[in-house]
Amino acid sequence: MTDLLIRNAHLIDPATSLDGVHDLFIREGRIAAIERPGAFSALEIKDTIDAAGLVLAPGFIDVHVHLREPGQTWKETIATGTRAAAAGGYTTVVAMPNAVPVNDTVESLTWMLAPARNAAIHLLAMPAATQGSLGEHLTHYEALAMGGAVGFTDDGKPILDDHVMRAALVVAARMGLPVSQHAEDTRLTGGCSMNAGPVAFRLGLRGMTVEAESNIVERDIALLREIEAEEGLRPHLHVQHVSTAKALAAIRQAKQQGLHVTCEAAPHHFTLTEEVLEGYNTNAKMNPPLRAEADRLAVIEAILDGTVDCIATDHAPHAAHEKEVEFERAPNGITGIETALGLALPVLHRQHGLPVAHIVALMSNNPAKIIHLKDRGSLKAGNYADIVLFDPTAEWTFAAAQSLSKSKNTPFDQSPMLGRVHATISEGRVVFRH
Amino acid sequence: MSDKSSSIEKGESLKDTGITLRALGAEAIILRHNASGAPELLARMTGLPVLNAGDGMHEHPSQALLDLRTMLTRLGLDPKSASETCLKGVTVVITGDIRHSRVARSNAMLLPRLGARVILCGPEPLLPQEALSLHPSIEIERDFDRALAQASVAMMLRIQKERLAGLSLDLGAYIEGYQLTEARIAAHVPNVLVMHPGPMIRGLEIQGEVADGPNSAIEEQVSHGLAIRTALLVRALGVKA
């Protein structure tokens, strides 16, 4: 592999306390050295990128994406989804297990992670926490961990049964891995297609209450406390796509009490509210649903105060014909892997004053910690050269038609974005260039 | 068109059904559908005028219009000059399963715009507080007798058992609290106009004697429906009078 020199970039990486203009030298797919501008001029390096005016950060890591392969390749494939991810500045994504069939065995995990799937960037996976994601019998955590699992989840569905969830947390704790929970009490959400409240009432749609989310979060936190006391283990609960003030309050309190809880927030939950569903826009239908303004602001507050550990997109591609149906019949989910940075910067940085460095932490340093990546998620010398170059001041308009994802189901088509990815480098190779 | 009499039953999407109808020369589509928002989807997909004949729990606009015509006629107002004040001084009490009722939603959005005072009445499981968002002037009164005492019009709604979805309701207590009876009318509002969009369940939300009695405009509502729906079609098709 050839050398690559990136010159004059503004390096931002809270994990290594970098915040200034430097040159970064890549050799054999790894970060070889970081020095003052011009320091590498004695080396005769053929491939250089002049990144003056751009931010250079550790490549983004998304712990929550749906790549639809195997089984639903008309929506997305590992190849197309990871190319879209590269366009969004991502260098690692974690595939959820709800493919067809469900990724719940070492064989399916190995198949998914194989080079033949042609992932453009580093691909990881969280296999199912229970067989078939049916919530009854645990999968083989030890074998799956050996096979590369970075956590366990039945994403799309919750693990409802108290005993099963407790067992999942205990066994995963022995592997040192998180259980990633889709917190939804489905006993309360039958037939529901959006947030409960005035908008749902006006639209004649059944609504999911905030308690449907917070009840499960509170139950899971109680289980953590119980397991720590009774088993002498330290289980790690990761709460997916938190969307309500109530669930965030429970997580905030659990963190203060020293329990090992992490959580993610999705860009759509800090950008949009249920109001955009007026007109029955199925491209704004997802689960958990867009909530009220108070909940949106609570998500932002929780990002600002550190309750939220990372931004995850819940990239969920669906074909146009699947979304062009009656609202209640449309599948949940929106694409999001190409718009995360362009939404995080205007909302969190420009509107709420969060430093760009904190956004880098939310999108790279912190997700790396959640899934225990040793040599990614920071610009430490020796790490894989997983890098994103972006212009944090560039204003542009996202066009879904130009998306590299197979699917275009986004509520952000033709929306203004702030911050544009110029190049994404995965293990030293340029995998995206604007 | 209804979803039970078309290829929708065979798995065809609403979009394709609409495009097929358009290709056959349809100039407008009348749609009744059990999914809220289906007419908006069909209109978007076909570009044709779509008359909403009732969508899920969302809206039933032609019912609200025929209810309006019934009120104007029976209350001695001028049915030919609907205006922002034509129902000034009229209090309409809508009682029953408002949560699941598209008729209630359409009336609660239409009538206040014409000057009427609208009071919604029912127990919490059938009438959530969110109903106040239908119009800024909407009121909720949970006590039926207190609501009825203020009514010029008592519009009664059926309990939609098929949509209760897990809600359990004590029917005995409901009848006791919310049934429109001759005794209640005599006690509070002898001249009240009684309306019901149908289908009604005699002996549940309304006493049979009340439905058949002198206060009832239920049969007239149906007749006004014919005129209103003819007018809506004329308008949708752009037919010149």
Image (cartoon, helix red, strand yellow):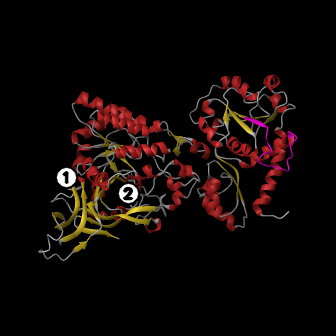
A54 shown above or below B91: below
| SS under mark 1 | loop
Residue A67 position in % (x across, y down): 37, 57
| SS under mark 2 | helix
Residue A432 position in % (x across, y down): 32, 68
First to last magenta residue range: B74-93
Q: Is B154 included in the stretch rendered in magenta? A: no
Name the subunit of mark 2: A
B180 shown above or below A95: above
Give the class, few, some or many, for how many residues have Cα within 10 Å of label 2's Cα (few <14, many ≥20). Answer: many
| Label of residue A374 in the image | 1
Q: What predominant SS class does the magenta segment belong to? A: loop
Q: Is B80 included in the stretch rendered in magenta? A: yes
In whole angstroms, how far apart are the C-alphas of marks 1 and 2?
27 Å
| Label of residue A345 in the image | 2
Q: Nearer the viewer, residue B169 or A313?
A: A313
Q: Residue at x 85, y 41 (%)?
A: B220
A424 shown above or below B219: below
Q: Residue at x 38, y 57 (%)?
A: A345
B148 shown above or below A113: above
Q: Which three-letter amino acid code belongs to the residue tagged 1?
A: Lys
Q: Name the quadrant containing residue A55.
A: bottom left
